[in-house]
Every structure is written in structure tokens, then in C-alpha cells.
Amino acid sequence: MCGIIGFVGEEQAAPIILSSLENLEYRGYDSAGIATISDGKICLKKDVGHLEEVQQKHHLDELPGVLGIGHVRWATHGGVTANNAHPHLDCSGNIAVVHNGIIENYRELRSRLKSKHNFISQTDTEVIPHLLEDYLNDGASLEEGVIRVTKQLQGSYAFVAIYSREPGKIVAARQGNSLIVGLADGRKFIASDSLSFLKMTDQAIFVEDGEIVVATKDKVRFFNQDSLELEKSPGKIDWKWDEATKQGYDSFTLKEILEEPETARRALMQDKNLVMDMALGILRARQVVFIGCGTSRYAALLGRYVFSKFGGGFSPVIIASEYPYFSESIDSNTLVMAVSQSGETADILEAVRAAKRKSATIFSIVNRVDSSLARMSNKVLYLNCGPEIGVVATKSFVAQLIIFYLLGFAIGNKLDEGLDKLAAAPSWIAGNHRENGKGLIKLAWKLRKRKDFYYIARGTNFHIAGEAALKLKEIAYVHADGMPAGELKHGSLALIEKGTPVIAICPEDYTFHETLSNVEEAKARGAFVIGVSDRREDVFDKWIKIPKVEEIFYPLVSIVPLQLFAYHSAIARGLDPDKPRNLAKSVTVK
Ligand code: F6R
């Protein structure tokens, strides 16, 4: 889960690579580096820190040459050190490689190579340049070497290699991790994500598993692992590059939360025939199983409720990384509903591959049109929410909920009714932002020293408690528990003391009175109670007002102020909400 980029063109490569890396930084930001080729030599700079820090210290953009590779890292193997930062070199310093993924057999390869090769990092990646070194010393070309290397590697990878003795060429390979080629006149890119080159070209070709790419400034060629050349043609990337910029906001996270009214509008723009078609597929399946991770899983939990309410039956929601332990129950009559913003989450892709091997049908709800999940699915509904760059999922969650509502109404054969009702969603959300904006800033500052938060709710609102707690953990680095309100008295009540913040999501729906009873229990032990409701109650020390909506839609309006609260809590604690420590947006490792 790193970002990789290779560029070959006519102008200086390093400034272009640096600007591409800025758009990949959401994938990893603990170290960064660039290598170029100039005068028959590899020139390399890399270090720990955010890209901007590494740039300030080392002036990455001043590296000479018209070809190069770059990397932003999210550490998996080996700590965050300058030696572990990419690019990695072979012993001679003639080969440089950037890699995203995990080489599972790197220990065996390393122990085989280490008598002849000098390893300077603890990474799994470093085996690649050393393997290449042997093949290239035997007389192989860079592409022949890369093909031979891929036959040695187990695990998942997307990597790009350059070789100082073939200075006009970049060569890349993919197995399990995203890789996309960008094409412009006299300029070619090979990157983890099209966002990295979208400002310069929207013409792209996806690289598939097992393929090898050879790019020069004028031409890109594709090969399979038997060295057979493949015919592939470019397509157009639909996103606009400026959607992936902050557009004047202080952070992507805030921008994306404030975009949610528009997100809701865009999520509603679905092909009705496709929605109905998927609803029929759901009704016909012997069983429907949801899979997702993190925020997408919380959306799926709500999806389960919506499907059950509209007659789609009860469906289990499986955390994607736990899927292997349930896989016996999956067969050709199973419909797997995979939910993912990125469509690149390794746990999800792995689960979907396993489900496909059992001949299950795959429907997915995805944001990234160019994603691996979208391409693996039988049918896809897109979130249409544009790039989500802030590491925490915000607007994509809103879009996921909207799509689950639409599918639910379609299952009940009431799609038009659902569309009519949800047409008001953008104004509910916009009103919510206006109503709570200032109050949430004050609340976040008041509670900025607090180290434990409890989010409680019942029924569908319980999933919002889980998602809201996840947001606070991720960006404010605070312990937060999202739990069913009724469970508090079965143990966690012991942790409530004077001033402990308890956030109760208790709209005036079927859960209202019972949740309030649990709120009273917490209050009696000294809790500072924050009520998220359309009805003010005396027991609330602070009221976060949400609009009165039909019962089923409360989750949609409750999450919005709680995302903002997490955002303001990060700011109040002096943290960067866009780059929470230890996390990265697209978790492309298992
Ligand atoms: C939470 C968050 C993560 C993701 C999870 C799944 O704010 O960002 O928990 O939700 O990694 O990612 P996708 O939806 O891309 O599969």
C-alpha cells in the first residue's frame, strides 16, 4: 500500500514525478523517494517523512534526467527508515525499483541471494533489484529480466524498474496490485492510480495481473509472462484532475465532508434498469452475503438492515479478512455484495477471488470506476462521488448508504418512491452542516483532552455509532467505542466516570425511549451526555440537532455531524486529519 509512478518523456522527469507523487500520497506518507537516469547513471534521493518534508530536505525535483521512478511508502516490511524507503537498488547501483504489495517468499529469495548480494534494507522489495541484477548480468534485457523475476515472486506486487544501461525505458509488472498506464504525446506514465497523471492525460490502459509493460517516450508495449506481445487499446478516465485538489479548503477531509450534499445528489444518479436488475438478482439468490472492511463494512451493515426491511431476507455481513473462515458456505447460488470505496482493498479482492472460484455471483458497490473490484464484478453500482483523497472515508459512506437505500426500495419494487424521498437528502445534509458547524467546533475543543469516548445507539443507528467511533479513532487518535446502547450495562458501564463523554444517537424513532433509558444509566454515573437527535431532552448536556426524517433515513443524517465532530477533534488536538498516523487510504496488503 504504497504509491508508485514511472515516467518517461522529453522534459525533466523529476518535477513531473514529484507532482504525480503528491496525488498518490494518500496511499502512504511515511517516506518518499525518486530515482532518475542521467549520463548513464542512476541518481537517487529518498528519506523518511511526508513527501513535502523529503522534498524540502533533498530537493527531489532537481534530480536530472528525462526518465525516472518515484514512491510514497506505507511501511509493511521493515521500519520507517531511510534505507527502507524506495526506490531500492541492486549492488551495482545500475537498477532501481519501486514496488507496491508484498513479496511473500522474500525470505527464501533473500537467503538464496545474500551470499552474492549486499542487502541494505529490511524490505521484501529489495529482492527484486538483486534478482534483476543477476539476469541483466547474464545478458537479459530489462524486460526479459522483469519477466524472469516475476516467475520467482510469490505474493502481490506492482513494480516499476529502470536500468542505467537502457536509459530510455521503464518496465513494470503487475500481480494483484493496481497498475495503470497513462499515454500522452512524448510522455508515458506507469502508476498505481490514474490520479497521479490525470492533470497531464486522461488516456489510459489498465494493466492486468500477469502482464509486463515496457514504456519508452513514444510507445508502450504489453507482454504476458510467456513474452507474447498483447494488443491493448486506451480508454478515457472520466474524473477531472481538479476534483483531486483541495480547491481552497484547509484539508481534503473537510472538503469531502462539505461536499456531501453533492455526493448524495450524484449517488442518486443511477441507471434505474441496472438497480432493478440487481434487486432482482438479490431476490433470486439463495443467499446474499455482504463483504467489506472498515467504513464500507458499516455501510454494508446498514445495507443488511435495509434489505431485510424491504423483503430481501436476512444477509450476513462478513469482514473481508474473515471471509476465508466462512468460505465453505459460499456456492454458485450465493450472491456476494462487495462494498468498497477504492475497489482495491486487498482483503476484499482476495475474498471476491475466492467467491468467484466457488462460482458465486459478484455484485459490487464501488467508487473507483477503474478499480480491480469493479472489473471483477458481474454487476456494479458506482458511488459517483469523485476522488476521495482524505484518508478517512466520509463522503463515500454517505454515497454507499444512498445506494443501499435505492437497492432496498428496488427490492420492494418501489424504486421511484425511494428516488422521490431521497431527492431531499442533499438538503437534509446541507442543513445539518449549517446547523451544527460552529457548535461542533466548540464541543471538539471542550473535549480535546478526553481520552475515551462511548458512542451508543440501537437498531440501525448502532452502525452509525460504530462508524462515528471509527472516525474519531482514526483522525483524533482517541479511544472510542461504538456499542449497542443496551450492552453498556453488561460491562462497559464500569468505565464511565465523571465527565466521560457518551454520545447517544437517539433520533425519535423506534429506538428512542430505550436508548434514553441507557443514557440515563450513563448519566447517573457522571457521563457527559451528547445527544444526537431531532428531539431535545433534559438529560443531554449537549444536543446535536438532526433533521426529522423518515425512520429509515436517520443513519444518513446522524453520521454527518459526527464526521464533522471527528474532523474538528483532530484540529483541536493539533493533528493533520488528511494524514492520520499509521494509516493509508487504500489498503492493498492483506
Ligand atoms: C475508514 C477507512 C477504512 C476503509 C477501509 C476499506 O475511514 O477509510 O476503514 O473504509 O480500509 O476501504 P475501501 O472502502 O476502499 O475498501
Image: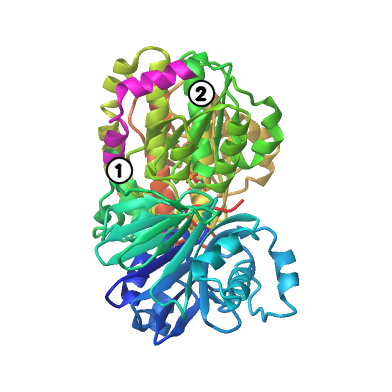
In the picture, residue 106 is in which quadrant?
bottom right
Between 380 and 512, the residue placed more toward the observer is 380
Q: Is residue 556 visible?
A: no
Give whichever of discs 2 and 1 has the lower sequence position: 2
Q: Is residue 452 visible?
A: yes
Q: Residue 553 placed where, x, y %? A: 39, 26
Above or below: residue 577 compared with residue 464: below
In the picture, residue 514 is in which quadrant?
top right
Label 2 environment density (alpha carbons within 10 Å; few <14, some 14–19, many ≥20) = many
- Mark 1: is the Cβ under 8 angstroms from ligand 1? no
The residues tagged by marks 2 and 1 sit, at their Cα atoms, a distance apart of 26 Å
| Majority SS type along the magenta span | helix
**Which residue lies at the image location 48% right of the left edge and 40% below the top edge?**
373
Above or below: residue 13 compared with residue 4: below
| Residue ID for mark 2 | 305
| Residue ID for mark 1 | 433
Magenta residues span: 262-281
**Which residue lies at the image location 27% right of the left edge and 74% below the top edge?**
10
**Which residue lies at the image location 26% right of the left edge and 26% below the top edge?**
423
106 relative to 431 in the view: left or right: right
Q: Is residue 264 magenta?
A: yes
Q: Residue 29 placed where, x, y %? A: 47, 66
Q: Residue 334 placed where, x, y %? A: 58, 23
**What amino acid is found at the position of numbered circle 1 in the picture?**
His
Q: Residue 446 placed where, x, y %? A: 44, 56
